[in-house]
Amino acid sequence: MKIYDLYIYLIFTVKILFILSALYYIYLKFKKQENSQTGQKIKYWKEKFEFIFVVLMSFLLIYLFNPRNTKINMINYETKFLLYLFGFILLIESNWGQFFNQSKIYNNIKNRK
């Protein structure tokens, strides 16, 4: 097995761990136990898994799209799927509130009403 394949499996494993911890944290929020010791640990690990996923995906993007390499043939189904999920994660986890609060256009529209 190639190192590249192992790296892809590592990213999938981290992503699955992130999803499981996120779902468990949502469950704890539903049960109003997110501030318990277990809730804090799950939140901590959820954030760590998310950070690790973003870092690993960033390294993958740097590796695949390095202008000196011509490894574009390495983008197989699994890599495409990871890049697809990465796009959604970045959109979901973006700080949209800060963007809209600092946007002059949004403030102008908000002040017109």
Image (tube, rainbow, N blue to C red):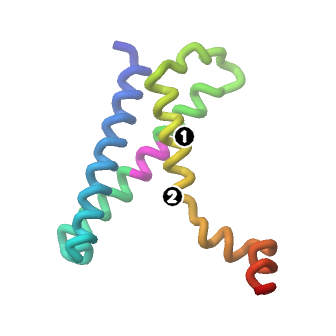
Q: Is residue 54 magenta?
A: yes
Disc 1 target residue: 58
- The image shows residue 21 at horizontal and vertical percentages of 27, 54
> Does 39 appear above or below 51?
below
Q: Secondary structure at mark 2?
A: helix
Return the mark for residue 93.
2
Q: Are marks 2 and 1 in contact (CB under 8 Å)?
A: no
Report the side of 43 relative to 7 (left or right). left
**Quadrant location, the C terminus:** bottom right
Q: Is residue 71 magenta?
A: no
Q: Residue furthest front?
A: 113
Report the side of 100 relative to 2 (left or right). right
Q: Quick one: label 1, few (<14), some, or many (20+) residues within 10 Å?
A: some
Image: magenta residue range:
50-55
- The image shows residue 69 at horizontal and vertical percentages of 65, 18
The residue lying at 63 percent from left, 72 percent from top is 98
Report the side of 93 relative to 69 (left or right). left
Foreground: disc 2 or disc 1: 2
**Quadrant position of residue 4:** top left
Could you give the CA–CA distance between mark 2 and mark 1, rounded to whole angstroms?
A: 15 Å
Q: What's under tag 2, amino acid-wise?
A: Glu
Q: What's under tag 1, amino acid-wise?
A: Ser
Q: Earlier in the sequence, mark 2 or mark 1?
A: 1
> Does 8 appear above or below 93?
above
- The image shows residue 30 at horizontal and vertical percentages of 25, 70
